[in-house]
Image (cartoon, rainbow, N blue to C red):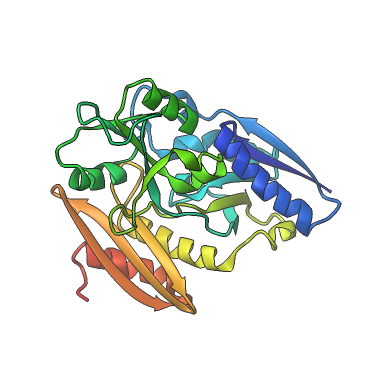
């Protein structure tokens, strides 16, 4: 059997895809895999932020088309890059074990502290809103491009620091670049951050992904994505959600911004009510329900 997997062509996307393909080959011996890489619309548009370009769906548009046409059998993504609503005919078939969910601060090579004359680079409204509270005296400026491109801009003197997902930095083997790891209380992660998602066509037999799927990551991801859908959070919205599991108990914190003010709430519940938990948290954030 041969499995064709679609991926963005960035170094990080390829590294994450190789993680999944290695797991497939180990769990389904004899399976042949082929990685089909492509540049997405989101990779090509670098002169404006995603909210002005059309949303995070731009990072999956070409991959969705390849999947639906049968050019590839599965597609592999950072879960945080997937829209909360999937196109008809596509489903998430597996969630990897969650890596590091936190965000980290990266300084230019040789720097010990951020140069306060230069802006901090942030690619998301979620990070920007929280950075303004953490660094109220510094400018926060958009930065586009893949991780390596952003690091080049940082080291070239365009920014005093960058904020990136720790999982991506670790998967690229760049841990030495980390200057500070933010706690989830300081910088609430994006929904799905640290998880690699595998998509397939609805009805496609994806038995070979059974050993790839991590049940705890799946439950937490479903709760977080339910919150994002219910709170109407897209890539242009500064909403976030982070769920953790302890035994069969889930604890989730959600965030949104209203009139420039960050609103956070937390809820707890059982595994069986993961999506309901996310929806309830959204109602609390929007003031439609009291604790």
Residue 182 vs residue 62: left or right? left
The residue positioned 56% from the left and 51% from the top of the image is 196
Tell me if residue 267 comes above or below residue 5 in the rendering.
Answer: below
Total labels: the figure holds 0
Quarter placement of the C terminus: bottom left
Can residue 226 be seen at all in this image of the molecule?
A: no
Tell me if residue 15 comes above or below residue 146 in the rendering.
Answer: below
The residue positioned 47% from the left and 61% from the top of the image is 221
For the residue pair 144 and 276, the one nearer the viewer reads as 144
Instruction: Residue 226 in the image: state x and y as whole percent.
Output: 40, 61
Can residue 4 be seen at all in this image of the molecule?
A: yes
For the residue pair 269 and 176, the one nearer the viewer reads as 176
Instruction: Residue 152 in the image: state x and y as whole percent.
Output: 44, 24
Give the farthest residue toward the right: 30
The residue positioned 54% from the left and 49% from the top of the image is 88
Residue 63 vs residue 281: left or right? right
Residue 93 vs residue 31: left or right? left
For the residue pair 47 and 11, the one nearer the viewer reads as 11
Instruction: Residue 283 in the image: state x and y as whole percent.
Output: 26, 66
Instruction: Residue 121 in the image: state x and y as whole percent.
Output: 31, 33
For the residue pair 288 and 49, the one nearer the viewer reads as 49
């Amino acid at each position: 059997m041969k499995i064709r997997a679609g991926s963005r062509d960035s170094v990080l996307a390829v590294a994450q895809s190789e993680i999944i393909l290695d797991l497939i080959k180990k769990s389904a011996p004899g399976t042949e895999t082929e990685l089909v890489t492509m540049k997405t619309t989101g990779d090509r548009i670098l002169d404006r932020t995603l909210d002005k370009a059309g949303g995070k769906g731009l990072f999956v548009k070409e991959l969705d088309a390849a999947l639906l046409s049968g050019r590839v059998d599965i597609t592999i993504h950072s879960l945080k890059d997937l829209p909360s609503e999937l196109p008809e005919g596509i489903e998430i078939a597996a969630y990897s074990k969650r890596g590091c969910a936190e965000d980290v601060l990266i300084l230019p090579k040789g720097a010990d502290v951020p140069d306060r004359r230069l802006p901090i680079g942030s690619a998301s409204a979620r990070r920007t809103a929280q950075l303004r509270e953490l660094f109220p005296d510094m400018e926060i400026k958009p930065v586009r491009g893949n991780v390596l491109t952003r690091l080049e801009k940082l080291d070239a003197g365009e920014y005093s620091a960058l904020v990136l997902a720790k999982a991506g930095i670790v998967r690229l083997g760049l841990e030495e670049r980390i200057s500070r790891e933010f706690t989830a209380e300081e910088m609430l992660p994006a929904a799905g951050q640290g998880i690699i998602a595998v998509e397939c066509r609805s009805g496609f037999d994806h038995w070979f992904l059974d050993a790839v799927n991590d049940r705890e990551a799946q439950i937490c991801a479903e709760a977080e994505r339910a919150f994002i859908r219910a709170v109407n959070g897209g890539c242009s919205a500064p909403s976030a959600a982070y769920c953790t599991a302890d035994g069969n108990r889930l604890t989730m914190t959600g965030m949104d911004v209203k009139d420039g003010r960050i609103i956070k709430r937390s809820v707890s519940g059982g595994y069986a009510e993961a999506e309901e938990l996310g929806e309830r948290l959204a109602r609390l954030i929007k003031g439609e329900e009291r604790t």
